[in-house]
Image: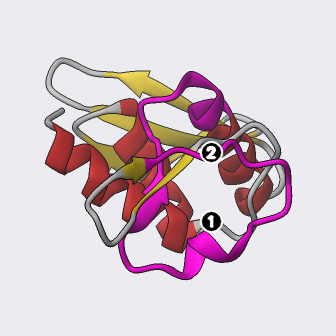
């Protein structure tokens, strides 16, 4: 994933998040072009409303939090991400039935797609 793809996916992730969890990493760019990385402590802070802000989808803790939010959003059952030959798929499992709820070129993209598609 290129830096630009990660930034765009991070913007999508921030828009799709119903709330932010403690431990997530975010970023924003100030007027001088400097990039800042706040660790989110549960309170969103004013930076999240900036159009040049997003979540750091390359950070392992942020990915874990996204997975927790996807599972919460889809309710009963569980959600898991599986790697296939050319992509990743987020699957919602309820009893013995699997439903594809997100698809992407990376684990992060599959999770963001699942958040965007959540009921």
- Spot occupied by residue 85 in the image (x, y as percentages of width and height): 18, 18
Q: Is residue 34 left or right of residue 4?
A: right
Q: Are marks 1 and 2 in contact (CB under 8 Å)?
A: yes
- Spot occupied by residue 69 in the image (x, y as percentages of width and height): 72, 51
Q: Which residues are magenta?
A: 36-64
For label 1, the residue is 17
| Alpha-carbon span between mark 1 and mark 2 | 8 Å
Q: Quadrant of the N terminus?
A: top left
Say whether residue 60 is magenta.
yes
Total labels: the figure holds 2
Q: Is residue 56 left or right of residue 89?
A: right
Question: Is residue 117 or residue 5 the one in the foreground?
Answer: 5
- SS category of the residue bearing label 2: helix
The mark found on residue 39 in the picture is: none
* Chosen colour scheme: secondary structure
Residue 74 visible at all: yes
Query: 10 Å neighbourhood of mark 2: few (<14), some, or many (≥20)?
Result: many
Question: Is residue 92 or residue 70 the one in the foreground?
Answer: 70
Q: Is residue 56 above or below residue 31?
A: above
Say whether residue 69 is magenta.
no
Identify which residue is drawn at 33% across, 54% down. 9
User: Residue 51's quadrant in the figure?
Assistant: bottom left
Identify which residue is drawn at 47% across, 79% down. 50
User: Residue 94's quadrant in the figure?
Assistant: top right
- Spot occupied by residue 76 in the image (x, y as percentages of width and height): 84, 52
- SS category of the residue bearing label 1: loop
Q: Is residue 11 above or below residue 100?
A: below
For label 2, the residue is 66
Identify which residue is drawn at 74% across, 42% down. 68
Query: 10 Å neighbourhood of mark 1: few (<14), some, or many (≥20)?
Result: some
Q: Earlier in the sequence, mark 1 or mark 2?
A: 1
């Amino acid at each position: 994933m290129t830096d630009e793809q990660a930034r765009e996916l991070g913007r999508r992730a921030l828009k799709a998040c119903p709330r932010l969890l403690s431990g997530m990493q975010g970023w924003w760019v100030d007027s001088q072009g400097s990039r800042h990385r706040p660790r989110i402590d549960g309170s969103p802070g004013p930076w999240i409303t900036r159009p040049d802000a997003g979540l750091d989808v390359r950070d392992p803790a942020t990915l874990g939090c996204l997975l927790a939010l996807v599972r919460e959003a889809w309710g009963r059952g569980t959600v898991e991400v599986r790697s296939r030959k050319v992509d990743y798929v987020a699957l919602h499992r309820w009893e013995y039935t699997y439903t594809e709820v997100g698809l992407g070129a990376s684990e992060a993209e599959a999770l963001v797609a699942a958040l965007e598609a959540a009921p």
